[in-house]
Amino acid sequence: MLPVARARSSLLAVGLAGALALAGTGCGGPDAKSPKSLVVPNPFPTKSALEKLARAPLKSKPGRAVASVPEWRVDPTDVPDVSPVERRLVERSSAAKRPTFTRELRCIARELGRLRAEHGADADERVQRFIIGACGRTDAGGLSTFHLSGEAPAELSDDELLEAWKGQLALPASFDGKAAGAWLTRKGTRAVVMFVGGEDRSDVTLSPSGTPGVVTVRGTAAAGVEQVMALVNQGREGVARCEPNKTATPPQFAFDCELDDEDPWTWIEVLSRKSGRVLLRATALLLARRDPSAPVELTRGAAATAPPRPDAVTEILESVNRARANASLTPLTPAPEQAAVNARFAAHFFDAEATNDPSTADTVALGLLAGWDVDGTIRDGSFFGTMLTGATSAASWIDYALEHPMGRFTLLAPGARQIAVGPTTAAGAGLGVVITTYSFFGAEDAQANAKRVMTHIAEGRAARGLAPATALGDLPALVDAARLVNAGQREPMAALERALAVETQRIGRPLLGWALVTHDLDVLDLPAELLDPGPVAVRVLVTHYHPEGAPWGAYLVYIVFPAPTRRQVATSAAAARAPDVQGRRPSTMY
């Protein structure tokens, strides 16, 4: 009747998101000295830096046995306020070391214990994630498990069994003073006592919004975080950004997330980016239920029912394109050379994730996201990587990935056209895959893009109570300059300086011009002169080019308007916003 095994394992949810924004800005004018080249920041590691990382040894990790069950059901409403195991632990521990037993962790302990009793192993990441979310926990990364298991006659009562095991019934010191849950599960003669504990590192909450089918996610951004976003799964293949709720003021955040009409429950993921970093990381994963009182069921995914393919890469690509077809999206074509690079570095990424080395993980992710071996001028890209321990086929991995909001965001991005799939079976632990997808510059709508920038300028002026800028007349030399830069025949600042000189002579009035470089036309650092009082007439021209030494292309935005007169400068100075109309040199910024 004594337990014969003890085991500990960490509950780790791995998710990494790619989101990149950069900008460069330069100013030119008729009185400026000879132009300098426009310097554009490159956040990506070089190919040589990646090669150096590839030579670093991988840290060996012990494998673990898991049970991959395709379906599971959780009813979190029937969890009692205390379990018999917890009652005994309270009686046997001092107040100083006593953990705080919570309903959510008690629910997780019950489900993980039930799975181990039925299958003799830990849950894999897919079922683990479902259990944690279904029980109401939003932070999987801060949890650890500990269990006792043994044989016990069926006629022995639970109280008699716990009394017989009382010598072993103790929590490890690492649980002292933390939140915890404990549960006894019996299956035939098999008995398992499961303990779950850890610190809740997330304050993210989920509540009804007041609008049917919409829930509100609230939380507080950690110190140093400058961007937070939330994604919600919708239906079988859909994913959408949640709408910011303006009732929250930083560092608090809030999002309203709309559930699909056919979804009894769905996943919502919160991601954040710290200042000085490029990639978004998952900070919370929530299971949103349409009916809070109803049980939730994890069912077999669509990929698991498809015919198996000869290799993981082919199977993943075909599964992704089936999902894209169902969502009426253009299929992805493989980027074979980049896929070979992804496969080479996949083990390094998962090694860094497992050993809590975010710096190396980010370097790998950015290096793959760069797409140094991708054909075409990249406009945008996304990265997703996750490990499914115990996976025996690519089908189970793809189901796991497409249940993940960030997985859908990457694999089902509407503008994506190429994909690089890099699998690894490091240490025989299962299947880990890192995937990058890419969209490309092509037939850009220059007029529509210029209109977006004009709208951005109007919004910036409106925020200061100013009238929108009006359109300046055609500047043929500026059009020629943009064409030459797009063709790789002229440097952006040199082309701008030449165009300003030509147009200044043609219209007989000095002009100011800015060159802004960005991957996102909605993220522009507007020249201060555009936000000064008084009327402003501007000419906006948008093209794209490939900055020297950078793996991605970028939008180049030219903004030109007449230099202010002395009277305008005096008026602006009186408003304590005197513009620097001469001598500003090109600068760069993130």
Image: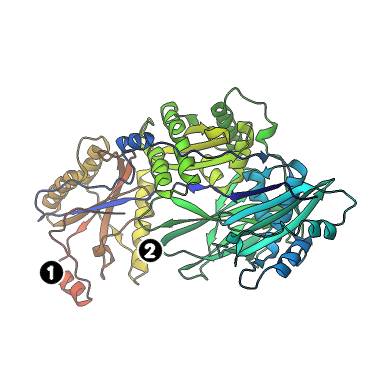
> Percent from the top left, x then y, of residue 58?
44, 37
Identify the residue at horizontal 62%, vertical 64% (top origin). 179
Q: Which image quadrant is residue 121 in?
A: top right
Nearest the eye: 165 or 347: 165
Identify the residue at horizontal 80%, vertical 60% (top origin). 163
Instruction: Identify whether 115 is placed above or below 430.
Output: below
Q: Residues within 10 Å of mark 1 (few under 14, many from 20)?
A: few
Residue occupied by mark 1: 566
In this view, the residue farthest toward the top is 310
Q: Residues within 10 Å of mark 2 (few under 14, many from 20)?
A: some
> Percent from the top left, x then y, of residue 337?
41, 27
> Percent from the top left, x then y, of residue 240?
56, 51
Nearest the eye: 189 or 212: 189
Which three-letter amino acid code belongs to the residue tagged 1?
Arg
**Badge nearest the viewer, 2 or 1:** 2
In this view, the residue farthest toward the right is 155
Which three-letter amino acid code belongs to the residue tagged 2?
Glu
Of mark 2 and mark 1, the one earlier in the sequence is 2
Q: Which image quadrant is residue 217 in?
A: bottom right
Q: Which element type, helix, strand or loop, lies under badge 1?
A: helix
In this view, the residue farthest toward the bottom is 574
User: Could you give the CA–CA distance between mark 2 and mark 1, rounded to whole angstroms?
Assistant: 27 Å
Q: Relative to residue 357, is residue 233 drawn left or right?
A: right
Identify the residue at horizontal 39%, vertical 51% (top origin). 278
Count of picture labels: 2
Q: Kindly tell me whether residue 75 is visible in this rendering.
A: no
Q: Kindly tell me whether residue 216 is visible in this rendering.
A: yes
Q: Relative to residue 525, is residue 271 drawn left or right?
A: right
Nearest the eye: 124 or 145: 145
